[in-house]
Amino acid sequence: MKTAFTILLYTFSLFSFAQEKTVSAVKNNVGNTISTATEVISITKVLTILVVIILTWGLMKLLDWFFKNLVKNFNRHRLKILRLQPIVKILVWTLAVYTLIITLFNPSAEAIYALMGSSALALGFALQDIVKNIFGGLLIILDRPFQIGDRINIKGNYGEVVNIGLRNTIVNTLDDNTVTIPNSAIISDSISNANSGALDCMVVINLWLPINVDVTEIRKIVEEAAITSRYLNIDRPITILFFDHFDDHAATKVVVKAYVLDARYEKLFEGDVTESSKKAFIEAGIYN
Amino acid sequence: MIFLDKLENGISFLYKLFDIDKKNEVSVIAEAEEKVQLPEEYLERFTLYPLQNKDFLKNRESELKSLELAFENWKITNAPLLVVNDPGEGGTSLLHASTYIYPTAKILETNHAVDSYKKLLVLLTTVLRIDIEFKSLKDLEKYINTSEDNHIIILENIERLFIRRIRGFDLLEDFLLFLHATKSKIYWIISINKYSFYYLNRVKYFSSHFSSIIHLKPILEEQLKAEIVNRNDGYQTVFLKPNNLSKKLEKQLKKATKEERQVILENIFFKKLANFSKGNISKAILYARNSAYNVKEKTVFIKPIKIRVFDDLSLNDLFILEAIFQHRSLSIKELNIVLRNSDRQSRLSIEKLLEKQLIRLTSNLNKRIEYRINLMYLDSLKELLRERLNRNFR
């Protein structure tokens, strides 16, 4: 009985001692966690994050405004200026992310390697489409198959590139529709670029005429319709070609290849030349 | 008040910075500056007119030598001569003064549009003093080539022989054929506006028709200064401080004595004049006239004017200005043809440009109203066309 009592007493004291130890350990743990948490999420750090985000956002807006004004004031160099815009913006974002990581975690080289390894794995699985797009965006910026302001045709969408983002590229079509194309889709597809960084671009105008027309007269009319158009880039050559077609109805196709002074006026130029040519054809009795 | 102003400025700066459109429309009614009426006697000194005599022509020695040489060359090669000049640069004065080289030269001024073969034939037969009526240029060409006489014709402003429309170049092209066909009998001296030359050169390879071309050089700064000083002769000149002066110059002026101050301000004025005129004598004279702030008895107060910058011109305005540049001057009817505009559309645009003083009205002998580029804005508008219309014009 005495032995049993001693064992019970011993067990109880051991238990109460263990309980006391657990409580103090928990207390310690909680204390440590709180101190670590306050170290990680201090007011200074929260403020730093806010300041960096606000500054980055402000800087982005400032850059947009700056580039917009530059483009307005130096229209002749519009495309060269716009070319710089995505590069500068990506640099700003990279700098902001770098500042945040360094300020918040101040990671060691090993931690960075570990983070990179694990992120690569995680990104590889979970964010593969986004990563594909981001790398696509970087490739577009580095490889430059087109730039902002270029007139491109991709996946049947023809229009002006208005933005090259990290994830996607925005094209404004001739019908004023905004088409957002993922960068990954762009790099895996063929792209036709009408002006390749130049302000002007070649416009091909097709005119259909009866088969028995006097080509000398037609050449004169069409050439003068192009050289008198206000939208013509007079510093570039004009080519006029004739083709005979005998498909359904026999017809002469006149192809005028001329450069518009600014790619933005492409359709206006085409319309102007077509309209004036048609009027002259009617005056000359070629059209009835 | 100052604080409120600063706050307002700060807010508008932030709006601009972040590209936020303000909802309210900003009223921009600038206070009209009352211009002191200057005496006619003084203003007359700054009238623009072409010189007729070589002795009054300054700083054109090399051009005159080129003209002499070109004439000697014609005697061997029969090559016609082309003189390319900007409005106000003194092209007319040079050609008129050059008649000492060829005293029998006849001057044919085409100040108005020559838009038909009939008009051109009348002009040519009048200048050649031929009383026969010709049906075509070919007939006149035959007549000239069979006659014994040689002629020298100075044809000014050849750009008035074309109009930018389909078939609008026929007359000019036929005239060039006529020029080539008659060049052994007639020494042709042709002048053309710089911008028309640029356009015609690009679309019709105009320069290839001329083996001798003279481009007028800008007049030297000292010569321009002498010209203006000469026009102010008899008046005591007092130079006033321009409105926008750098802090450095302000400090310099504060430290200077009254005489030194005048020297500094005179230098500033002539530097601004040279920068503005870029060697164009007419522009320099206009600048000096517009800078005359007031005239009291025999003292003229000169304050350098500030040249306005136009960045609010629409694409349509620029096309109109370019059309006028290409033809030297245009009437409303011609403008409708060139730009394929309706009459109302052209009138509205022209009124807007007149209001901004970018163009000015001229009327020719037939009292036909035409519009010309205001010389005061010649270079700034060219720069604008270069920048906004992607024109490779120098």
Image: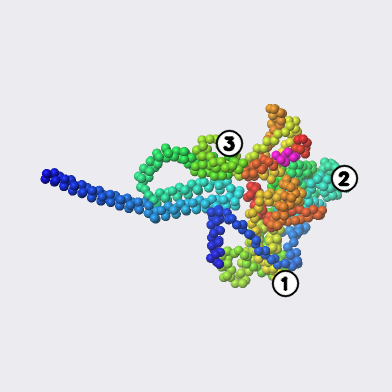
Q: Whole-Å distance between the Cαs marked 3 and 1? A: 77 Å
Q: What stretch is highlighted in magenta?
A: A274-280
| Residue at which label 3 appears | A156
Which percent across, then down, holds residue A274?
70, 39
Residue B261: quadrant of the picture: bottom right
Residue A244: quadrant of the picture: top right
Whether A188 is drawn above or below B127: the answer is above
Which percent across, then down, holds residue B211?
72, 45
Q: Which of A148 and B72 is in front in this view?
A: A148
Quarter placement of the N terminus of chain A: top left
Density class for disc 3 (Cα within 10 Å; few <14, some 14-19, many ≥20) is few
Residue B250 belongs to magenta span: no
Residue A278 belongs to magenta span: yes
Q: Residue B133 carries which label?
A: 2
Density class for disc 1 (Cα within 10 Å; few <14, some 14-19, many ≥20) is few
Q: Whole-Å distance between the Cαs marked 2 and 3? A: 64 Å
Quarter placement of the C terminus of chain A: top right
What residue appears at the point 87 percent right and 45 percent down from the top-left corner? B133
Name which residue type carries label 2.
Glu
Q: Residue A96 carries which label?
A: none
